[in-house]
Amino acid sequence: MPAPVVFHIDAERGFSGGEVQVFLLLEGLRERGWDPVLACPPGSAAAARAADLGLRVAAIRMRSDADLPAVGKLRRAIRDAGAQLVHMHTGRATWLGGLAARPLGVPTVSTRRMDRPVRRNLRNRLIYGRLVDRAVGIAPAVSRLLREGGVDAGKIRTIWSAVDPTRVEARRARAEVRAQLGAREGDVVLLTTATLVPRKGIDVLLQALRRLDDRFRLAVAGDGPERAALEAEAARLALTGRVSWLGRWDAVGDLLSAADISVLPSRAEGLGIAALEAMAAGLPIVASRVGGLAEAVVDGQTGVLVAPGEPDALAAALTRVGLDPELAARLGAAGRARIEAEFLPARMVEGYDRLYRELIGGGP
């Protein structure tokens, strides 16, 4: 009997936390006996990654939400693949993929990762009323926003995102990486890994760093449209020598091993894969009390939560954790234990496996 086909759609050209989750799911589904197919833009990072893993790829441009030719191409690809279910992973993918799948009568799942309100407009009523059979929130806070946006509670499921602990294993010695970051003996290295956009709150972190003594250094791993402005702000605050702008850094385990605290000063966050990676590496976290981030990080147990947008509160929390090695060790150990209990990929894949079988009435 052939493996049932699940057709996944991701409209992004880049590769960030959402795509990490998509590939954890694709690989886990294949191991469980499903046949996953990924539709993504040609030349995208996801297309290259899927090819490396030997996954089936449908290369389809999805230039905008008004890209009607993409709807036709997706519909043909879904039909040609013999898909029994369509799973859509971004907002654009949900709109275009939903329009493509509905006339075929194929069940649909949409995963929502963003911590922003669901507007009660005509488009969303169409998406969640007719085009999507199940809407998945990656954390309870995201599912709550779906309900508050008028989505039928019977359609909503919560399936936590996951982290592969092997992804955060260090390849290089801690001392070697710290030296590369310019850290001296006794320095407290703060690490933030993020796309450099306003909602990540890196500007707030720079303001907090200015309030800390020069034992505290910051490593920023990631790139984005705000990088030049943030570097200029660091210079204005006389922080140039205390901040390392690393750009995209694939060996995240090396950075986590070299750091003392993971900092997530987000203004909004569906969950924050960087938080899960830090916990898997046993690193204490200081983060904003927003969205699913405030549910993944347990305040006082696996990290310290502060109000978003408040550099004084952020600086106080960083001082508290950074200058108390026993507290930092306790938070880090509890974080690692929480990952083992709640956030391993097998648990996420099992959740989707169960949801798929609910919709198609069978499966592996």
Image: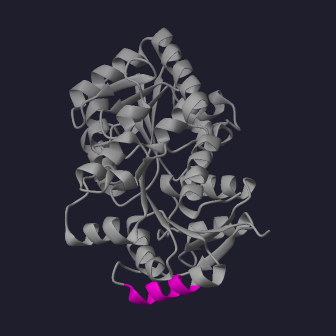
Can residue 232 be seen here? The reply is: no
Magenta highlight range: 67-76
Work out whether 355 lies above or below 341. below
Does the segment drawn in magenta span residue 68? yes
Does the segment drawn in magenta span residue 230? no
Quarter of the image with the N terminus in it: bottom right
Can residue 286 be seen here? The reply is: yes
Residue situated in front as seen by the camera: 44 or 293: 293
| 101 lies left or right of 36 | left
> Residue 238: percent from the left, percent from the top?
29, 37
> Residue drawn at (44%, 78%), measured in percent from left and top?
102
Residue situated in front as seen by the camera: 6 or 107: 107
For residue 2, what is the image quadrant? bottom right
For residue 336, what is the image quadrant? top right
> Residue drawn at (49%, 45%), measured in percent from left and top?
159
Quarter of the image with the C terminus in it: bottom right
Q: Main secondary structure of the magenta part?
A: helix
> Residue drawn at (49%, 70%), measured in percent from left and top?
13
In this rendering, the count of numbered labels is 0
Residue found at the far right of this picture = 1
> Residue 215: percent from the left, percent from the top?
41, 22
Coloring basis for residues: one colour
> Residue 117: percent from the left, percent from the top?
24, 53
Work out whether 127 lies above or below 138. below
Residue situated in front as seen by the camera: 350 or 167: 350
Residue found at the far front of this picture = 361
